[in-house]
């Protein structure tokens, strides 16, 4: 892994977030896949595009790699992944699974 960008390091994020955001900062054609709120704010401030786990699942459905998002969101929730109920409801509506 390359050096952590000083602009990213200033946010005092975790090692994983620092590495992902630094890499994306150095490779402008990529987006960061992160869910951490502080890391998302950092990315926004640095102009790094971001997609979260739920966004990846929605994209997989849009591109027809999966038929439904609900089984994946249910597994995430069962494994302790936190999803705001309002966001989950919106995602299910977007996926026509409400």
Image (cartoon, rainbow, N blue to C red):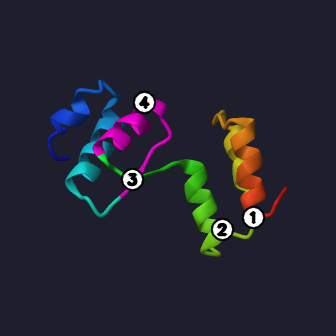
Residue that sits furthest to the bottom in the current view? 64
How far separated are the C-alphas under marks 2 and 1? 6 Å
Q: Which residue is mark 2?
A: 61
- The region drawn magenta spans 31-46
Give residue 54's position: percent from left, percent from top.
61, 50
Q: Which mark is residue 49?
A: 3
Distance between the alpha carbons at the discs numbered 3 and 2? 20 Å
Q: Is residue 74 visible?
A: no
Image disc number at residue 68: 1
Magenta segment's dominant SS is helix
> Is residue 45 shown in magenta?
yes
CA distance separating discs 3 and 1: 25 Å
Q: Residues within 10 Å of mark 2 (few under 14, many from 20)?
A: some
Residue occupied by mark 4: 38
In the rendered image, which quarter is residue 15 located in?
top left
Q: Is residue 30 above or below residue 6?
A: below
Q: Secondary structure at mark 1?
A: loop
Q: Nearer the viewer, mark 3 or mark 1?
A: 3
Tell me, for residue 36, which label it has, or none: none
- Label 1, label 4: how many angstroms apart (C-alpha)? 29 Å
How crowded pointer 3 is (Cα within 10 Å; few <14, some 14-19, many 20+) is rated as some
């Amino acid at each position: 892994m390359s050096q952590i960008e000083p602009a990213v390091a200033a946010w005092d994020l975790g090692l994983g977030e620092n590495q992902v955001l630094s890499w994306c900062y150095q490779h402008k054609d990529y987006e960061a896949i992160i869910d951490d709120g502080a890391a998302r704010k950092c990315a926004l401030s640095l102009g790094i595009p971001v997609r979260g786990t739920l966004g990846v699942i929605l994209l997989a459905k849009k591109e027809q790699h999966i038929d439904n998002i609900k089984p994946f969101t249910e597994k995430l929730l069962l494994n302790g992944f936190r999803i705001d109920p309002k966001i989950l409801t919106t995602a299910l509506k977007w996926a026509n699974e409400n």
